[in-house]
Image: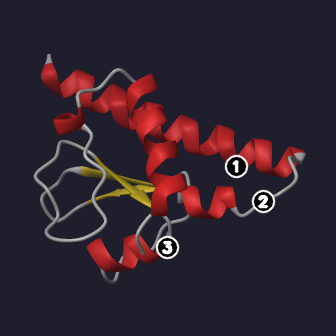
Amino acid sequence: MPLGAAGEMMMGKIVSALKLPEDEAPVVSSGLLPDADVYVVLGARALKKWFPGKSASPGQGFAAESGRPVLVTYTPNYILRFTTVTPALQQIKRDMWTTIKSAARKVSDNAK
């Protein structure tokens, strides 16, 4: 499922905040799975598309067939559905941010 303009903008802000070059943190919603050190899967649909037969909840991870880490988190589209900020939504955002920062650390560690 494509992220849409708002989701793309949200992911752009996240990648920018992580100070990662776009080629090191591509947001891919179609085509082939890129060669990457770490995969961050945004939501259940993306998980089924890119890693059929695998299951994981947001915040969980597993190793891809290539051995590379796969981290699962919420899709921006899910977060953007909420119209009221609640403690639950704030926790979802923190969980997503934690997962993405973890992926950025793994990329950084692999670059050393």
Q: Position of residue 61 (x, y in %)?
A: 42, 55
Q: Which is more N-terminal, label 3 or label 1?
A: 3
Spatial CA span between label 2 and label 3: 18 Å
Write down the residue under mark 3. Answer: 44
What residue is rendered at 42% in x and 75% in y? 1
Where is 83 relative to 94, above or below?
Answer: below
- For the C terminus, the image quarter is top left
User: At label 1, which amino acid type do we have?
Assistant: Ile
The residue carrying pointer 3 sits among few (fewer than 14), some (14 to 19) or many (20 or more) residues within 10 Å by Cα, namely: some
User: At label 2, which amino acid type do we have?
Assistant: Phe
- Label 3 sits on a secondary structure element that is helix
Q: Which is more N-terminal, label 3 or label 2?
A: 3
State the mark number for residue 92: 1
Where is 14 relative to 83, above or below?
Answer: above
Q: Position of residue 23 (x, y in %)?
A: 16, 37
Q: Position of residue 7 (x, y in %)?
A: 51, 54
